[in-house]
Amino acid sequence: MKNNAVEISTTYTDTNGDRYLSKTPRLLNSCVFGVFPKEGSPAADKFEPVAPIDISSEQSFARARNWLQDCVENHPACSHIASEFTPTRLLRIWNRQGRRLIQLRESDRTRVRYAALSYCWGGEQDVRTTKYTFARHRTRINFQDLPRTIQDAVILTEKLGLEYLWVDALCIIQDDEEDRAREIDLMGHVYEKADVTIVASRAKAVQEGFLQNLLSYGYNKPEWVFKMQYRDLSGHISPIVIAPMFFRTPTDYLSDRGWAFQERLFSYRIIEYSSTCVHWFCQSHRDCDRQGGKCSAHDLEKGIEIFRGLPDHNSTVTMKTWYKLVDKFSQRSLTVAKDRLPAIGGIAERFGLRTEVAYLAGIWRTSLPSGLLWIVDRYANPNFQGRYYQPRSSTYLAPSWSWASTTQPIKNSVYVGYGVSKADVVRVDIGHQTKETTYGNVTYGYLTLRGFITPVSWTLPDEKEQYSDGKITRGASSLSIAICRDASETDLRVERGNIIRAYLFVLVANDETTKVTGLILYKHTDNKYSRLGVFDVPYCPADQEKYPDMARGLLQGDPEEVTIV
């Protein structure tokens, strides 16, 4: 097995007190054990060493300082950090007469070295900078009042030899919508220009902290930890320890969080406190605090993508990269649903600066119309309640034609970039929350297209029919059609029942026009439309031969203008 793991099984005999029951050996549940060398053992170069448990020791902090110092002094690829950018506000941490002082400091545009914190809120925070607390925080912030994760970040910042720390809850005025929008727009720069990003992956909530001792393997099953002798192929004998790994499942809470996605992508240097060890990632080097710097391939592999997504990090990045990043991002969760666009806004800004293409609530102007053909991916993430469609958000997130209008995972790779366009973009009108936040929240989005539209009847499936998307008919005829719904459409069921009037709007077709793909729309009383999903006609390649005119039938008549909201 991988990572020095062995699988150990045993049997037991069940007689059940019955003299006629034969003694049948049965297999107990197997358990994964780790094989570790004892300290100083000759076998140390053959097995993965155990990570230190005390990650708040002076030795551990010294190792972290050395990683940072070595990168600053010896890694030219990481020198991009040196710039004139300074966040609007930073926490200043210093000592006066042996007392730690923390103060919210407004920038005077002088470049200072600072760390940035990436962490899970885990709900509302008691200590935040608001309009009411702003003046008090500029005078002093009491260390003891801070939640444990932020306390640990303050301690680590000091130990790294830095004086300044950026924490969103304290450096953004949380109840000032204009300040939030402006600062969220700058977050990509905040993490990119930080001397190091502190990633608190092991903390599920801000109250938990990340500098507490790691749990040792077998901590709750000491009787399952045992020593034995190991003989290698050359005949050398060395002492090793076998301990159960089954009871310490690695956890990385940040890998599921939407905001952490761009924080990791932008960061040039990362020191990550995981549930198993402390990792270091930079442009030039990856390491961990296990003896000899050995870490599992899986643990280190996740750091590789950090620097591969952004245009200024990689000249080969294209718009296709953007849609791949959106697919990954959409699988992550957000505490506040309306943060869908802001949480990826920094990445969008970089693509916009590189391409100078208009950004339309998550979709690039040059990607239209095929860029509208994203689909909800019900199978992407088990955290999104399996294969069932979810209701639409009760709050406005984005126009229905944008992937940001749903909180579910989406997939762009099925249709984006496919086919010959059969629709023209007439005009687009986007309302932004504030004038400066092109890549943040929007208040409305009108997209007017000219193309072929066909009225149909859509019989929605029963909500318990998780594998069905219903049936669409055109007049008295059934269509060979593949349907990808955006939501459960609970509201429409209440309003219209199981059969609704829908419209098929063709966006693209294959070269032979034997297959067409487009949007399923719903018409409102003001004659504007909203998106319900994506369709494919006919359903399968065999039907293209069987019904060669079915797709062409959706391209008859005169093109019409439709406005989708």
Image (tube, rainbow, N blue to C red):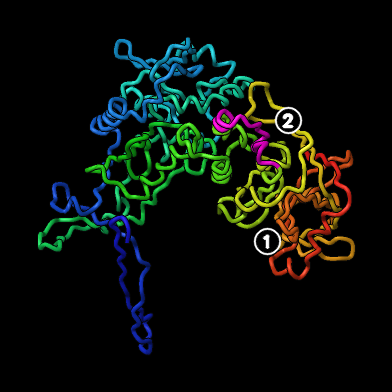
Residue indicated by mark 1: 466
Q: Earlier in the sequence, mark 2 or mark 1?
A: 2
Q: CA distance from mark 2 to mark 1?
A: 35 Å
Q: At 14% from the left edge and 50% from the top edge, which residue is drawn?
A: 41
Residue 352 on the magenta segment: yes
> Magenta span covers which residues?
350-368
- The residue at 55%/54% (across/down) is 382
Rendered image quadrant of residue 468: bottom right
Residue at 32%, 52% in the rendered image: 220
The image position of residue 230, as x and y in percent, is 16, 60
Q: Where is residue 428? Give x, y as percent.
A: 75, 33
The answer to if 38 sits in the magenta stretch is no
Say whether residue 462 is visible. Answer: no
- Name the residue furthest front: 512
Looking at the picture, tell me which residue is in the foreground, 481 or 197.
481
Q: Which mark is residue 269?
A: none
Q: Which mark is residue 430?
A: 2
